[in-house]
Image (cartoon, rainbow, N blue to C red):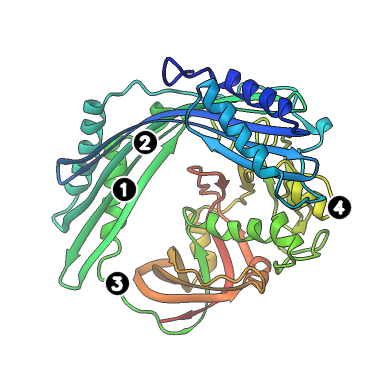
Amino acid sequence: MKTRMDNVPLEQAAEIALQQAKLLGATAAEVGVSHSTGLSVTVRQGETETLEHNNDTGLALTVYLGQSKASASTSDLRPEAIADTVKAACDIAKYTQADDYAGLADKELMATEFPDLSLYHPWDIDAEQAIVLATECEQAGRDVDAQISNSDGATLSTHEGGRVYANSHGFVGSTKSSRHSLSCTLIANDESGMQRDYWYDIARAGGDLASAQAIGQRAAKNTLARLNARTVKTGSYPVIFAADIAPSLIGQLIGAIRGGALYRKSSFLLDQLGEQIFPDFMHIHEQPYLLKGLGSCAFDGEGVITHARDIVKDGVLESYVLDSYSARKLNMTTTANSGGVHNLTVESGEHDFASLLKQLDTGIIVTETMGMGINIVTGDYSQGAAGFWVENGEIQYPIDEFTIAHNLRDMFMGIQAVGNDVELRGNTRTGSILLESMTVAS
């Protein structure tokens, strides 16, 4: 894959960088080279508001002189530009402090097989066709009800590209991937004021996206449902995190068991490996080899082979989330999570969303959270929120401008059920999550 006639292919660029690093005395080196192209169109009130094309190339290199390391990058893949970038990194490394834990991931951990995970599905769509689809999406939403009074637009994005990671162990791994999305945000108003909401879909293949009409209509439905919002009386109530925001709750677990938080002793889950932190029905695991998965990959950002593995099993914390540096700091082995987790999956139970509502009985559905009130050191959790009030297992009316608060340790242990309405539009796959109780304040 080339970007200009004078640029070299990605694998050749990686090879040049590694050879040059060796010539300049680097004891080890690693390089990532990427190229991507894309199109993004936004239509608002039937008019094209933005039209963007991207064509991006980059090379990022890290060199090691013993235990000292330095990095440099460039967007120019001409051989002479690569050589200049390598020299800059080597010059910097001469002055950086040695770190006993620095270095490449261990050679024996490198991936050796690269199965086709069906990640690359370029979409043959031009700007005019993209504008038509975005227009259809927005119009479908605006046609639902006269109370849809305005729009923040519909956006279609399509991106594809390739990346090569290589290091001085002799590892070379390349991936090609694509990602396409369509979203719509609408505004409705009545005598009580205005509300905004949205819907979207994202997929590796354009043909796997929901229809433009369905996305626009769902955005309208979500927006209309928020009209006539009321306040909620302060108290403690059971809470459902709806499926599309439940990944944010699971994300707090991952943040607390990342190597960086652990070796800095800045996590409320410090020294909890092997301890029960969820109810015994909870099973959270990685599935890096799912076809078309948004988090699928055969190797991580350091070339380490990925594995399907349990993070929480029977409610017990089975593993951390480590790259090679944090693993060394903790006297452990990398879990192949340089760059993040891979299709993190929360196993769901037998309950659909209606069943969760019946189990909730009287309480709150949270459909949106906002704010930065989460302390990963103590586990204290406090977020602004919006959602719905539920009585007798039935949604009664929308509520907004309230706060939900608790401690994450108690929230995790207080999970009552995980619904089978699994959210698949991201790297965390989970259904709605019912919690026993949270403090709610208007």
Mark toward the viewer: 3 or 4: 4
Relative to 367, 302 lies left or right: right
Which structural element holds mark 2? loop
Residue 343 tag number: none
Kindly identify the residue that appears in the image at 82 percent across and 50 percent down. 100
Report the amino acid beneath label 4.
Asn
Residue at the spot of label 4: 331
Q: Earlier in the sequence, mark 3 or mark 4?
A: 3
Residue 210: mark: 2
| Residue located at (47% from left, 27% from top) | 161
Mark 1 or mark 2, earlier in chain: 2
Label 3 sits on a secondary structure element that is loop
- Mark 2 / mark 4, whichever is N-terminal: 2
Which of 250 and 214 lies nearest the eye of the viewer?
Answer: 250
Q: Please state which of the two labelled residues, at mark 2 or mark 4, is closer to the viewer.
A: 4
Q: Position of residue 67 (x, y in %)?
A: 79, 45
Q: Which residue is mark 3?
A: 229
